[in-house]
Image (tube, grey):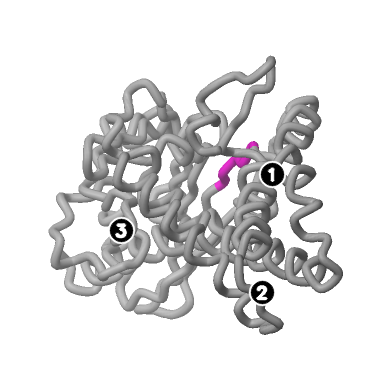
Amino acid sequence: MRAMMVWHWNGVAFTIMSNTFLFIVPMIMGYITIATMTQKSDKLLRALFLPWIPVIAGIIFTLIVAWEGSICAIFYVPMAMVMSSLGGFIAWMLGKSGQSKKMMMAMLVLPFMSQPLENMHSPKDQFKTVHSTVEIHADEAAVWNQIKSVPKISTSEMQDSWVHRIGFPRPLDAEIDKESVGGVRLARFERGLTFVETVTDWQENKTLAFNIDVDPKDIPPTALDEHVTIGGPYFDVLNGRYTLERKSKDKIILHLTSEFRLSTNFNWYADFWTERVMQRIQGDILSVVKKRAEQKI
């Protein structure tokens, strides 16, 4: 089924970023696993957990042959395991009455029915905002100097974050060409990923806001998985805003807000992961700003 995602079969365009692949395919894998067992078992736990083996093996195979990257694989695993257990449970229930094998053909043709129906509806854009904060014991000028331009960030300054371990590039530095509205701030990340940020609001020591432009064609293929590429058909980061809030003489609350777009047929599931990734990335950036501002680097 994964191989067929890049083919057309009788005019059916199979796609990975679909409910068919996310939900139905692993459910069928779970169903087949239990329905084809030569020795039937009344144990429900076996029906629920045995389907995990072929699902995980299939995911590992896609990684080995480079059909998928680690980011997409990790995001896919939880739902694939849940749906494969559901398929195993259905096969287990039907197996009690001897109907599981009779339903096999219906299960096998299900993707060829669901995918064309899904293709009739274009994904809807969903816009979300992520807000992160950090408390910094420094004055506004010290904090401002760390956000308008960012000197090169060493590996030791960054927290050991799970988002970077699974493949998201680490931030490296940022440089602005003009300290005013209209200025262009280049934010560079590992593996050649660069955000072109055009300043839309500049209030010295108070607010820095910018639109973000990323051309997917300029992103090296090794920077991100195909299906989570920034600026691509499924995901994009649109803008960002730093706001400095004075709480006392030597305490600042630094706010970082960003807006992103999701365009999938399962935005509710994509949003669950995207929001957590964005929160973690923003948190890592704020932690660097905090350390540097408090040390007045």
Horizontal and vertical percent position of residue 192: 23, 35
Q: Is residue 39 above or below residue 151?
A: below
Look at 78% across and 68% down and name the residue there.
95
Horizontal and vertical percent position of residue 250: 35, 78
Q: Is residue 260 magenta?
A: yes
Image mark for residue 40:
2
Q: Could you classify mark 3 by the number of other residues whose Cα lies within 10 Å: few (under 14), some (14-19), or many (20 or more)?
A: some
Task: Compare residues 190 and 37 and report the one nearer the observer.
Answer: 37
Which quadrant, please, contains the C terminus?
A: bottom left
Q: Amino acid at mark 1?
A: Asn
Q: Is residue 78 above or below residue 62?
A: below
Q: CA distance from mark 1 to mark 3?
A: 27 Å
Look at 65% across and 39% down and name the residue there.
18
Q: Earlier in the sequence, mark 1 or mark 2?
A: 1
Q: Earlier in the sequence, mark 1 or mark 3?
A: 1
Which quadrant, please, contains the N terminus?
A: top right
The residue tagged 3 is: 164
Q: Which corner quadrant of the image does residue 27 belong to?
A: bottom right
Q: Is residue 49 above or below residue 170?
A: below
Q: Could you classify mark 1 by the number of other residues whose Cα lies within 10 Å: few (under 14), some (14-19), or many (20 or more)?
A: some
Q: Are marks 3 and 2 in contact (CB under 8 Å)?
A: no
Q: Main secondary structure of the magenta part?
A: strand
The residue tagged 1 is: 19
Q: Earlier in the sequence, mark 3 or mark 2?
A: 2
Residue segment shown in magenta: 259-263
Look at 66% across and 52% down and name the residue there.
28
